[in-house]
Amino acid sequence: SISFLFLLQVGFFPSECVELINDKVPQSVTNSVPKPVSKKHGKLITFLRTFMKSRPTKQKLKQRGILKERVFGCDLGEHLLNSGHDVPQVLKSCTEFIEKHGIVDGIYRLSGIASNIQKLRHEFDSEQIPDLTKDIYIQDIHCVGSLCKLYFRELPNPLLTYQLYEKFSDAVSAATDEERLVKIHDVIQQLPPPHYRS
Protein backbone atom coordinates (compact mmCIF):
# COMPACT_ATOMS: atom_id res chain seq x y z
CA SER A 1 0.00 0.00 0.00
CA ILE A 2 0.98 3.67 -0.35
CA SER A 3 1.34 4.18 3.42
CA PHE A 4 3.65 1.15 3.70
CA LEU A 5 5.80 2.34 0.79
CA PHE A 6 5.86 5.82 2.35
CA LEU A 7 7.14 4.43 5.67
CA LEU A 8 9.82 2.47 3.83
CA GLN A 9 10.96 5.57 1.94
CA VAL A 10 11.11 7.68 5.09
CA GLY A 11 13.18 4.95 6.73
CA PHE A 12 10.94 4.00 9.65
CA PHE A 13 11.74 0.30 9.20
CA PRO A 14 15.23 -1.16 9.75
CA SER A 15 16.58 -3.19 6.83
CA GLU A 16 16.18 -6.50 8.67
CA CYS A 17 12.46 -5.79 9.16
CA VAL A 18 12.08 -4.98 5.48
CA GLU A 19 13.63 -8.33 4.57
CA LEU A 20 11.16 -10.15 6.84
CA ILE A 21 8.22 -8.17 5.48
CA ASN A 22 9.30 -8.77 1.85
CA ASP A 23 9.17 -12.54 2.46
CA LYS A 24 5.52 -12.28 3.44
CA VAL A 25 4.38 -9.76 0.79
CA PRO A 26 2.60 -11.41 -2.17
CA GLN A 27 4.56 -11.50 -5.44
CA SER A 28 1.89 -9.42 -7.19
CA VAL A 29 2.52 -6.52 -4.79
CA THR A 30 6.33 -6.61 -4.95
CA ASN A 31 6.34 -6.81 -8.75
CA SER A 32 3.91 -3.94 -9.22
CA VAL A 33 5.35 -0.62 -10.28
CA PRO A 34 5.26 1.83 -7.35
CA LYS A 35 3.05 4.81 -7.90
CA PRO A 36 4.84 8.15 -8.03
CA VAL A 37 4.88 10.01 -4.72
CA SER A 38 2.45 12.93 -4.77
CA LYS A 39 3.67 16.47 -4.13
CA LYS A 40 1.93 16.37 -0.76
CA HIS A 41 3.79 13.20 0.28
CA GLY A 42 7.04 14.54 -1.16
CA LYS A 43 6.79 17.65 1.02
CA LEU A 44 6.01 15.52 4.04
CA ILE A 45 9.04 13.28 3.38
CA THR A 46 11.26 16.36 3.02
CA PHE A 47 9.85 17.84 6.24
CA LEU A 48 10.43 14.62 8.18
CA ARG A 49 13.99 14.27 6.88
CA THR A 50 14.75 17.89 7.82
CA PHE A 51 13.16 17.39 11.25
CA MET A 52 15.21 14.25 11.94
CA LYS A 53 18.47 15.92 10.88
CA SER A 54 17.82 19.06 12.94
CA ARG A 55 17.13 17.25 16.23
CA PRO A 56 19.29 18.68 19.06
CA THR A 57 22.02 16.47 20.47
CA LYS A 58 21.69 14.72 23.81
CA GLN A 59 24.27 17.13 25.25
CA LYS A 60 22.24 20.20 24.18
CA LEU A 61 19.05 18.74 25.64
CA LYS A 62 20.87 18.18 28.95
CA GLN A 63 22.23 21.76 28.94
CA ARG A 64 18.71 23.12 28.44
CA GLY A 65 17.41 20.99 31.30
CA ILE A 66 15.03 19.09 29.00
CA LEU A 67 16.82 15.75 29.33
CA LYS A 68 17.66 14.37 32.76
CA GLU A 69 20.19 11.61 33.33
CA ARG A 70 18.80 8.57 35.09
CA VAL A 71 20.51 7.60 38.32
CA PHE A 72 18.80 4.33 39.26
CA GLY A 73 18.88 1.37 36.88
CA CYS A 74 21.61 2.97 34.75
CA ASP A 75 24.94 1.34 33.92
CA LEU A 76 27.49 2.47 36.51
CA GLY A 77 30.25 3.38 34.05
CA GLU A 78 27.83 5.24 31.75
CA HIS A 79 26.29 7.14 34.67
CA LEU A 80 29.68 8.27 36.00
CA LEU A 81 30.83 9.28 32.53
CA ASN A 82 27.69 11.39 31.98
CA SER A 83 27.69 12.92 35.47
CA GLY A 84 31.44 13.61 35.63
CA HIS A 85 31.68 12.08 39.14
CA ASP A 86 34.14 9.44 40.35
CA VAL A 87 31.50 7.85 42.59
CA PRO A 88 27.70 8.14 42.18
CA GLN A 89 26.38 11.16 44.09
CA VAL A 90 23.61 9.06 45.62
CA LEU A 91 26.18 6.74 47.25
CA LYS A 92 28.44 9.60 48.34
CA SER A 93 25.58 11.53 50.01
CA CYS A 94 24.04 8.47 51.65
CA THR A 95 27.27 6.98 53.01
CA GLU A 96 28.43 10.33 54.42
CA PHE A 97 25.06 10.72 56.13
CA ILE A 98 25.14 7.16 57.50
CA GLU A 99 28.70 7.58 58.85
CA LYS A 100 27.63 10.76 60.64
CA HIS A 101 24.11 9.87 61.85
CA GLY A 102 23.38 6.25 61.08
CA ILE A 103 25.57 4.18 63.37
CA VAL A 104 22.57 2.24 64.69
CA ASP A 105 21.72 -1.45 64.84
CA GLY A 106 20.66 -2.92 61.51
CA ILE A 107 21.27 0.20 59.41
CA TYR A 108 21.47 -1.94 56.23
CA ARG A 109 19.37 -4.82 57.57
CA LEU A 110 16.17 -3.01 58.52
CA SER A 111 14.04 -1.33 55.85
CA GLY A 112 13.00 2.28 55.89
CA ILE A 113 9.50 3.62 55.17
CA ALA A 114 8.71 3.00 51.48
CA SER A 115 7.35 6.53 50.85
CA ASN A 116 10.55 8.09 52.24
CA ILE A 117 12.72 5.82 50.08
CA GLN A 118 10.71 6.75 46.96
CA LYS A 119 10.89 10.45 47.82
CA LEU A 120 14.70 10.26 48.12
CA ARG A 121 14.94 8.25 44.91
CA HIS A 122 12.87 10.83 43.02
CA GLU A 123 15.06 13.69 44.26
CA PHE A 124 18.28 11.97 43.16
CA ASP A 125 16.71 11.03 39.80
CA SER A 126 15.75 14.70 39.36
CA GLU A 127 19.45 15.62 39.72
CA GLN A 128 18.89 17.20 43.13
CA ILE A 129 20.90 16.46 46.25
CA PRO A 130 18.31 16.09 49.00
CA ASP A 131 18.89 17.48 52.47
CA LEU A 132 19.22 14.26 54.44
CA THR A 133 19.31 16.16 57.74
CA LYS A 134 15.57 16.91 57.51
CA ASP A 135 13.56 15.47 60.39
CA ILE A 136 11.76 13.07 58.04
CA TYR A 137 15.07 11.32 57.25
CA ILE A 138 16.70 11.69 60.68
CA GLN A 139 13.64 9.98 62.19
CA ASP A 140 13.80 7.26 59.51
CA ILE A 141 17.54 6.71 59.10
CA HIS A 142 16.89 3.24 57.67
CA CYS A 143 15.39 4.75 54.51
CA VAL A 144 18.86 6.07 53.59
CA GLY A 145 20.44 2.62 53.99
CA SER A 146 17.54 1.15 52.01
CA LEU A 147 18.15 3.65 49.20
CA CYS A 148 21.79 2.51 48.93
CA LYS A 149 20.65 -1.11 48.69
CA LEU A 150 18.06 -0.12 46.08
CA TYR A 151 20.73 1.62 43.99
CA PHE A 152 22.98 -1.46 44.00
CA ARG A 153 20.05 -3.82 43.36
CA GLU A 154 18.98 -1.91 40.23
CA LEU A 155 22.42 -1.77 38.58
CA PRO A 156 22.14 -3.58 35.21
CA ASN A 157 25.60 -5.10 35.81
CA PRO A 158 26.12 -5.75 39.56
CA LEU A 159 28.86 -3.94 41.48
CA LEU A 160 31.03 -7.08 41.51
CA THR A 161 30.06 -7.68 37.82
CA TYR A 162 28.72 -10.78 36.12
CA GLN A 163 32.10 -11.26 34.43
CA LEU A 164 33.93 -11.77 37.75
CA TYR A 165 31.18 -13.77 39.48
CA GLU A 166 32.98 -17.14 39.19
CA LYS A 167 36.26 -15.67 40.46
CA PHE A 168 34.55 -14.10 43.50
CA SER A 169 32.74 -17.37 44.14
CA ASP A 170 36.03 -19.29 44.05
CA ALA A 171 37.72 -16.70 46.29
CA VAL A 172 35.14 -16.92 49.09
CA SER A 173 35.32 -20.73 48.94
CA ALA A 174 39.05 -20.77 49.77
CA ALA A 175 40.09 -23.14 52.56
CA THR A 176 41.62 -20.66 55.04
CA ASP A 177 40.85 -17.07 56.02
CA GLU A 178 44.28 -15.94 54.88
CA GLU A 179 43.94 -17.57 51.45
CA ARG A 180 40.39 -16.20 51.13
CA LEU A 181 41.61 -12.66 51.88
CA VAL A 182 44.40 -12.86 49.28
CA LYS A 183 42.09 -14.25 46.58
CA ILE A 184 39.34 -11.69 47.22
CA HIS A 185 41.92 -8.89 47.12
CA ASP A 186 43.20 -10.18 43.75
CA VAL A 187 39.71 -10.31 42.23
CA ILE A 188 38.82 -6.83 43.52
CA GLN A 189 41.85 -5.49 41.65
CA GLN A 190 40.30 -6.83 38.41
CA LEU A 191 37.09 -4.80 38.77
CA PRO A 192 36.49 -2.10 36.12
CA PRO A 193 37.53 1.34 37.52
CA PRO A 194 33.94 2.66 38.10
CA HIS A 195 33.02 -0.51 40.00
CA TYR A 196 36.30 -0.51 41.94
CA ARG A 197 35.82 3.13 43.07
CA SER A 198 32.20 2.59 44.10
Image (cartoon, grey):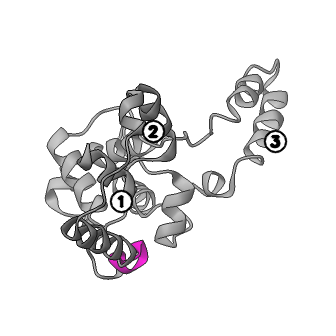
Q: Quadrant of the N terminus?
A: top left
Q: Is residue 193 left or right of residue 18?
A: right
In which image quadrant can residue 149 be found? top left
What residue sits right under mark 3 in the picture? 186
Q: Is residue 57 magenta?
A: yes
User: Where is residue 67 shown, x and y percent of the image?
Assistant: 30, 69
Packing grade of label 1 (10 A; few <14, some 14-19, many >=20) is few
Q: Residue at x 42, y 29 (%)?
A: 27
What residue sits right under mark 2 in the picture? 17
Q: Which residues are magenta?
A: 55-62
User: Where is residue 156 shown, x and y percent of the image?
Assistant: 49, 41
Can residue 71 be seen in this snapshot?
no
Q: Residue at x 27, y 69 (%)?
A: 42
Q: Element under label 2?
A: helix
What residue sits right under mark 1 in the picture? 10
**Which of these two is toward me, 25 or 137?**
25
* Earlier-in-chain disc, 2 versus 3: 2
Q: Main secondary structure of the magenta part?
A: helix
Foreground label between 2 and 3: 2
Q: Quadrant of the C terminus?
A: bottom right
- Which amino acid type is marked by label 3? Asp
